Amino acid sequence: MATYKKRGFKPKNKAEEVVLDEQNSTTAEVFTTLDESASKTEAWVSKNQNYILGIIGAIALGVLGYLAYTQFVQKPKESSAANELYYPQQFFDRAMTDEVAKDSLLNLSLTGADGKYGFLDIIEEYKGTKAANLATYSAGMAYLNMQNYQEAISYLEGFSSDDAILGALALGGIGDAFSQLEQPEEALDYYEKAITHNANDYTAPRFLYKAGVVAMDLGYSEKALEYFSRIKDEFSKSPEANNIDALIGFAKK
């Protein structure tokens, strides 16, 4: 138990004198130890001063270098890449509404034209930028629509995003590619990933429906019933909810 010594305290007897002497002795030892530790620390700092200053200098240079790189290299690179992305994206968007010229437009979106970059050029020339990441997604979707499923999987797997819509669409796109390659187990796996990525009203019912259909083909009736029931219960206003009762009925058989 700690003791508190009042200022001006005087021992009343021999026993109290002994206790007081012990306390004073202990306090002196503590301060002596602290003084010795401080001296050793000062000596170590003095001995290794150049080394310490070198580390501090290296850290400072690293921070300044990072800030300079971000300001004078990365930011201009991001801006340039974003500008380049606008051109091939126009071809891609047109392809989605023009069935006749779809393949040629998608090819132009990938390779570019008239000296302008396509998605593949942006991926190569602007690595590490947000635009290159988006170009990776668009390239994967372009290949998917061109029925080049292996390339579609490769590029969509290389895309990374926490975005609720794009992240789910990329995962679902991989599922579509595997489905077309007649690999239903892999397709179902990616549809499930797309569902869990984000339960928004656009992508969730879409991939719940696809997952349910693939599960039915694989003979996983309970899984199919779970997916179809979620559409009915959670996304009743979605297009996928049309005739969902019939699919639920099939899954129950």
Image (tube, rainbow, N blue to C red):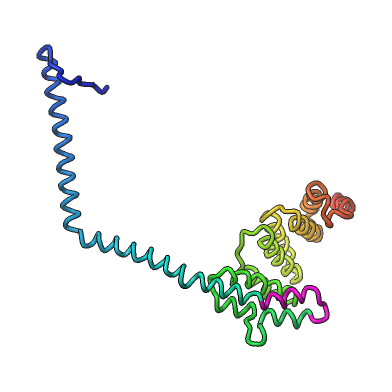
Give the farthest residue toward the left.
14
- In-image side of 36 versus 227 (left or right): left
- In-image side of 69 versus 39 (left or right): right
**Which residues are drawn in magenta?**
87-101
- Does 130 appear in magenta? no
- Does 100 appear in magenta? yes
Query: Quadrant of the rendered structure where residue 103 is?
Result: bottom right
Q: Residue at left 60%, top 80%?
A: 121
Q: Residue at left 17%, top 34%?
A: 30
Question: How many marks can you see?
Answer: 0
Q: Residue at left 61%, top 67%?
A: 159
21, 9: nearer the viewer:
9
Q: Residue at left 51%, top 73%?
A: 76
Give the farthest residue toward the bottom.
114
Is 15 drawn above or below residue 108 in the view shown? above
Query: Quadrant of the rendered structure where residue 90 is?
Result: bottom right
Is 2 drawn above or below residue 142 in the view shown? above
For the N terminus, give its image quadrant.
top left
Residue 164 location, x and y as percent? 67, 57
The kind of secondary structure the magenta stretch mainly shows is: helix
Residue 228 location, x and y as percent? 81, 52
Residue 160 location, x and y as percent? 60, 64
153, 38: nearer the viewer:
38
Query: Quadrant of the rendered structure where residue 118 is?
Result: bottom right
Residue 99 location, x and y as percent? 82, 77
